[in-house]
Amino acid sequence: MKFMEDNTKNIIKEYFNKSFNFIFIDLIIDIFLLLFSLYFVSSYLIKITIYALIIASTVFLITILYYSYNNFKNKIAILKECCNGEISYNKKRNLLTCSYSNNLKICLSLDYDRVYINKIDKYIKDTEDTRDFYCVRFEDGKIERNEEYMKTFQGIFRLIDKDNIALFQGKTIIIDKIDKTRIKYGIERLVNQE
């Protein structure tokens, strides 16, 4: 359990470092506007307006990053509750992955607010990263809509597990909105089909 806590701290730290880039860019823009207003603007009203914009943009950015950070922590908590293994964060694709069991992998796309629960029936081979998909790329098979928020794919798919990409045969449940009860229901459906 101690390892899971350390891993979560590392994931949150990595996400925070990614968010820090936005703060750094905002600070550069703010400093540029401040220097511009000090040296080139003589009107008091325009200077005050520029200062107000600098303060407003910084407060707005910090607020957005705060809500984004809390949302990220909530998604980690949901995934932690649904997984038995280590959670890993893929910075390039902005996704979280973990294992429920050896043949049941979960991938959560943070950009698209979507969860892929993958039941692996057969490993086919390791494959190249085509960089044109998040979590899972469906190669050959069919997709059925089960419920309004859930689809099921059966066939051959590429799966990202940590930083590795491999081709598998099996079944994937796609959940359109990240929700703990929906994820548990999807896991239950795939486990009961074994």
Image: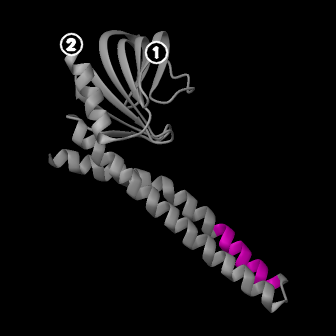
Please tell me which residue is depicted at 26% across the width and 20% down the height of the picture: 190
Q: Is residue 126 visible?
A: no
SS for tag 1?
A: strand
**Residue type at numbered disc 1:** Ile
Left or right: where 34 falls relative to 74: right
Per the rendered image, the range of residues in magenta is 28-39
CA gap between label 2 and label 1 equals 19 Å
Q: Is residue 99 magenta?
A: no
Residue 114 placed where, x, y %?
44, 35
- Between circles 2 and 1, the one closer to the viewer is 1
Residue 100 placed where, x, y %?
23, 29
Left or right: where 6 falls relative to 170: left
Q: Which of marks 2 and 1 is nearer the N terminus?
A: 1
Q: In which quarter of the image is residue 130?
A: top right
Mark 2 touching mark 1, by CB under 8 A? no
- Front residue of this view, candidates 54 and 163: 54
Please tell me which residue is depicted at 50% across the width and 12% down the height of the picture: 139
Kindly identify which numbered label has been placed on residue 194: 2
